[in-house]
């Protein structure tokens, strides 16, 4: 990787790029641009297994493909949707809703697959490397352009015509491949850390369930029925005034969009240049803090990683009263059975809302101090490894995000 001082640049609609690079609309660089459809019968026809997968917007994130919630359809439905069949190396772009603009490459292990109407298939031709395209669409300026030009009436959306006319800088295909290799090497490390975290979570979650969920009707000696508040504080986020938002601010506001089911999305829509004086300490987030979504998809829990994050309202910070119970706190709220309870006590018509007061009043089994300490001995090192993995992901992501715009503009040549 080097900076070619002899590179000459030309001004274009997307900024300066090397003179020898082309600038073309995406429709001239693809063999297919098209969104999918929902099978007849809609969500009621989906299953949790089967040969054919249906990829939806909730499966697609810039940093990874989310397998949880991946729908399956039968052969008849797959045949009906054969025109939106996903193939290896296809780039998938979310084109509607809150996830508008998220992009990823289809994993080979989900094929054969189709996409629903919220996802567009972008299939590149010989002039455009698919990994180069995926990374270009991850640029913040491209994200901002997509969000600023959405054509939706009741929800954010972009049309096929808009996607076709995305302007793409096109280096020589060999330079594209070299750029793709650099970025892929970083993304592969991020994905490896993420997979390790998933396996660690499964291990610790299984231990938690064996020790504390499958205990039977008779409680062991020293155990009792209590409430969440006996062990955990459920601290709500701060109602930041939008008049204080600063797009160039150093402090990023964490909202429900950042809290996914088991993972944190580090990109934030809003930020501040300074912290208001009344913001409580629990809203100044640090690595290893446990977040709970209180609105919409309630009950989602994740671990925070990174610096300068502030907790906005409608998200709670789960703070163990005894710090030694941090792993217990996390794996309690990550249990599917407990998440179902949280959803059952949520209220709302347009969207569900979870009350922090009702959450901390929920009855739970309180293990003996000896059992809690024994679990901590086993689970806290696993929890710490999760925190370290998340920090590593944050560092790698920051490195990639620094390189990305410079590689894509030709300021760094390879």
Image: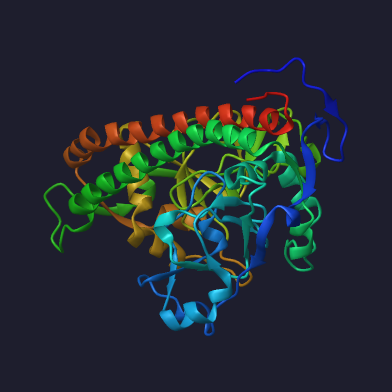
Q: Is residue 97 visible?
A: no
- Relative to residue 102, is residue 105 drawn left or right? left
Residue 356 drawn above or below residue 42: above
- Residue positioned 40% across, 75% down in the render: 47
For residue 138, which quarter of the picture? top right
- Residue positioned 68% across, 36% down in the render: 172
Along the line of sight, which residue is nearer the eye, 405 or 18? 18
Q: Residue 51: where, in percent of width, then height?
A: 37, 71
Along the line of sight, which residue is nearer the eye, 103 or 157? 103
Quarter in which the N terminus is drawn: top right
- Residue positioned 45% across, 83% down in the render: 76
How many marks can you see? 0
Q: Is residue 170 visible?
A: yes
Along the line of sight, which residue is nearer the eye, 188 or 33? 33
Quarter in which the C terminus is drawn: top right
Q: Residue 133: where, in percent of width, then height?
A: 64, 46
Along the line of sight, which residue is nearer the eye, 233 or 80? 80
- Relative to residue 324, is residue 176 drawn left or right? right
Query: Which residue is most to the top?
Result: 5
- Relative to residue 50, is residue 148 drawn left or right? right
């Amino acid at each position: 990787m080097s900076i070619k001082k002899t590179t000459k640049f030309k001004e274009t609609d997307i900024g300066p790029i090397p003179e020898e690079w082309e600038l073309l609309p995406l429709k001239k660089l693809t063999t297919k641009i098209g969104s999918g459809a929902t099978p007849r019968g809609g969500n009621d026809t989906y299953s949790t297994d089967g040969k054919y997968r249906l990829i939806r917007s909730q499966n697609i994130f810039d940093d990874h493909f989310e397998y949880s919630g991946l729908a399956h359809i039968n052969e008849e439905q797959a045949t009906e949707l054969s025109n939106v069949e996903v193939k290896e190396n296809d780039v998938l772009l979310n084109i509607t809703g809150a996830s508008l603009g998220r992009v990823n490459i289809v994993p080979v292990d989900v094929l054969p697959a189709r996409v629903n109407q919220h996802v567009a298939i972008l299939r590149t031709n010989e002039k455009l490397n698919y990994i180069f395209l995926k990374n270009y669409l991850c640029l913040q300026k491209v994200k901002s352009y997509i969000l600023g030009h959405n054509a939706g009436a009741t929800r954010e959306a972009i049309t096929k015509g808009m996607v076709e006319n995305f302007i793409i800088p096109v280096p020589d295909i060999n330079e594209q491949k070299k750029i793709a290799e650099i970025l892929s090497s970083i993304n592969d490390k991020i994905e490896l850390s993420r997979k390790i975290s998933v396996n660690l979570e499964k291990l610790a979650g299984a231990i938690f369930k064996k020790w504390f969920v499958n205990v039977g009707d008779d409680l062991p000696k020293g155990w009792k029925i209590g409430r969440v508040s006996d062990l955990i504080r459920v601290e709500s986020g701060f109602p930041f005034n939008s008049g204080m938002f600063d797009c160039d601010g150093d402090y990023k506001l964490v909202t429900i969009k950042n809290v996914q089911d088991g993972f944190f999305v580090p990109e934030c829509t809003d930020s501040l240049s300074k912290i208001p004086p009344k913001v409580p300490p629990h809203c100044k987030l640090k690595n290893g803090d446990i977040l709970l979504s209180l609105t919409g998809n309630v009950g989602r829990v994740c671990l925070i990683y990174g610096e300068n994050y502030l907790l906005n309202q409608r998200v709670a910070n789960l703070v163990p009263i005894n710090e030694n119970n941090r792993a217990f706190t996390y794996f309690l709220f990550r249990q599917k059975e407990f998440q179902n309870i949280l959803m059952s006590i949520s209220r709302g018509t347009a969207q569900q809302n979870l009350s922090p007061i009702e959450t901390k009043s929920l009855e739970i089994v309180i293990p003996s101090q000896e059992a809690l300490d024994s679990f901590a001995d086993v689970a806290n090192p696993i929890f710490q490894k999760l925190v370290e993995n998340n920090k590593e992901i944050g560092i790698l992501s920051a490195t990639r995000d620094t390189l990305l715009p410079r590689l894509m503009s030709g300021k760094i040549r390879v």
